[in-house]
Amino acid sequence: MRFPLSLTAGMARYIARNKLRPRPEWQQNSSAAADGSNPFRILHRSGPPDQPKKAHPMIGKRFPLVLMLEPLHACNLTCTGCGRIREYESTITQKLTLEQCLAAVDECGAPIVSVCGGEPLLYPEMGSLAARLLERNKHIYLCTNGMLIRKRLHEFKPDDRLFFNVHLDGLEETHDRCVEKKGVFRDAIEGIRAAKQVGFKVSTNTTIYQETDMAEIEALLGYLEPFKLDGHMLAPAYGYTSVDDREIFMTREDVHRKFKDIDRLARRFRVNSTPVYLDFLQGKRDLPCTAWGNPTYNTKGWKGPCYLITDGHYKTFEELMTRTPWEDYGYGNDPRCEHCMMHCGYEPSAALGINSKPGDNLRLLHWILR
Ligand code: SF4
Ligand code: SF4
């Protein structure tokens, strides 16, 4: 993500401190002995089973960067590619209390909290939750479909650390088709307009599917230019097993093709992703998955191993960190990870400087300043 300068500096300090002195209680591998208490299904190991696997470059240095907080899974839409409303269908009426949300935020300690769901603006205490997170000096990305922004805007105060991150998958016709409801694009645009008019930070979040026409995405970013938004996130879709329509998801090769022209878009518009993550999406460099950098908490607990795959839910953050066999996930280790290039697994790897090349720091500095 592209962050304000204050956050980038704070994040750099946080990463340096944790790399130097990672919290020891998060570095154990309690799951090493796979037994009945280990909820994970290890489907596949890369390489011959009798040979030790290559150690992860961040082994012994796990810490979270962004907490994905899901106070509820209820939503006012039924988007075609949404894994959440399908996976959590049986618990869709449940929600976390405000106290549970704050306890998870404190337990994990990540400097950025991405409040998602479901639709977080259906969460009755959303205004109070944002205020309490700001008191803790967290940066907040409130990920919303935008339909309820105008109705609930009065519950928030503009703050440089609070972003409404609005989901838009294309121009009006395409977006309304993706979310399976007419009028959603217009509502989201009116929400964006209202929030910007009174001084809120607003960014957008676009999922790129097999069918996405990248020329339309360029047109969308052009359409949004007059709103002077505070960044755009573009990410490839992940093929959730709970979503039936397999045709809409991409292979790694498809992702490389879709993002081949992303540097040009990133020069023209405020694309949030770091240059290293964009290299990865284009197939110019490899990154290992660091899903522990983006842990998810919801009504069932700490979701492991990642935002996308659910092999178990843990009661505590420490359990998630120590009982997940992290090295059994990622490209080449688990078939479900084969085509995943999502930011929740790989943007932390870019931010942590894994597989860095000479010149990366300069590119990063240029990106921040620009
Ligand atoms: S708005 Fe978000 S949570 Fe709701 S159905 Fe669409 S993708 Fe899922
Ligand atoms: S590669 Fe993707 S699906 Fe696999 S663990 Fe990492 S983030 Fe999750």
Image: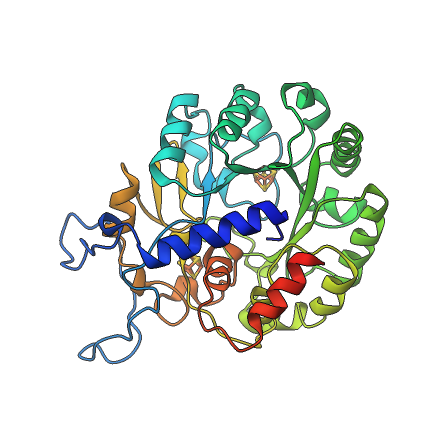
**Residue under the point 33% across and 55% down:** 62
- Front residue of 281 and 5: 5
Give the colouring mode of the picture.
rainbow
Give percent across and percent down for residue 66: 47, 46
Location of residue 100 in the rendering, given as x and y in whole percent from the top left corner? 37, 26
Position of residue 154 relative to residue 11, above or below, is: above
Q: In the rendered view, would you say 52 is above or below 207?
A: below
Identify the residue shown where x is 79% and y is 48%. 171
Apparent side of residue 56 relative to residue 8 in the rendered image (left or right) = left
Determine which quarter of the picture holds residue 130: top right
Q: Is residue 93 left or right of residue 187?
A: left
Seen in the picture, residue 241 relative to 250 is either above or below; the reply is: above
Quadrant of image for the C terminus? bottom right
Instruction: Identify whether 158 is placed above or below 172.
Output: above
Q: Is residue 360 visible?
A: yes
Residue 309 visible at all: no
Q: How many marks?
A: 0
Percent of width and height locating residue 180? 68, 40
Residue at (31%, 75%) from the top-left corner?
46
User: Could you say where residue 185 lies in the image, as x and y percent from the top left?
Assistant: 76, 39
Residue 317: image quadrant is top left
Direction from residue 58 to residue 72 in the image, left or right: right
Image quarter for ligand 2 equals bottom left
Q: Residue at x 68, y 19 (%)?
A: 154
